[in-house]
Amino acid sequence: MTFIFEKLDVYKKSVDFADKVCELTSSFPKGNYYLSDQLNRAALSISTNIAEGNGRYHKGDRTNFFRIARGSAFECVPILEVGRRKKLVCDSYAQELKKDLEDICKMLSGLIK
């Protein structure tokens, strides 16, 4: 069985993003758990809020969850920046992940409108 939201490109892209983040943070050294945990939670929150929003009957409820998903995407940006400054994420990969977030946010804005 396939849920409708699983066909959305923004959902697929957000799951891919969460997977990339999970792989990235698995290599963070000890003492950086707070960054790893917060980034993983924010990244996963994007796709989970898209899914939960699609499970709502009222347009306002759906829109609210899409806004929360977009907020989670925005939350990832400063965490990635701190990781980059601490040399946990190389510059080019941080830029790649930020580009993914930018694409996700644009798609979410489309769903919100």
Image (cartoon, rainbow, N blue to C red):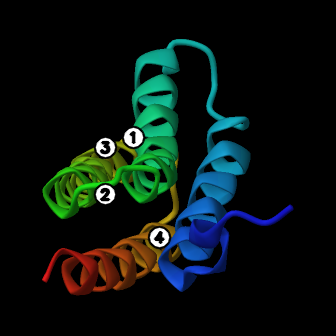
On the picture, is 12 further left or further right than 48? Answer: right
- The residue wearing badge 1 is 42
Give the Cα distance between marks 1 and 2.
Answer: 7 Å
For marks 2 and 4 on the same chain, the one whose residue lies earlier in the sequence: 2
Q: Position of residue 25 (x, y in %)?
A: 62, 39
Q: Position of residue 42 (x, y in %)?
A: 39, 40
Disc marking residue 97 = 4
Q: Which image quarter is the N terminus in?
A: bottom right
Give the Cα distance between marks 2 and 4.
Answer: 11 Å
Viewer-proximal residue, 101 or 87?
101
Q: Are marks 1 and 3 in contact (CB under 8 Å)?
A: yes
Disc marking residue 29 = none
Give the Cα distance between marks 3 and 2.
Answer: 11 Å
Q: Are marks 1 and 2 in contact (CB under 8 Å)?
A: yes
The residue at 61%/15% (across/down) is 30
On the picture, is 21 further left or further right than 2? Answer: left
- The residue wearing badge 2 is 73
Identify the amino acid type marked 2: Ala
Identify the amino acid type marked 1: Ala
- The residue wearing badge 3 is 79
Nearer mark to the viewer, of 4 and 1: 1
For marks 1 and 2 on the same chain, the one whose residue lies earlier in the sequence: 1
Give the Cα distance between marks 4 and 1.
Answer: 13 Å
The residue at 27%/57% (across/down) is 62
For marks 1 and 3 on the same chain, the one whose residue lies earlier in the sequence: 1
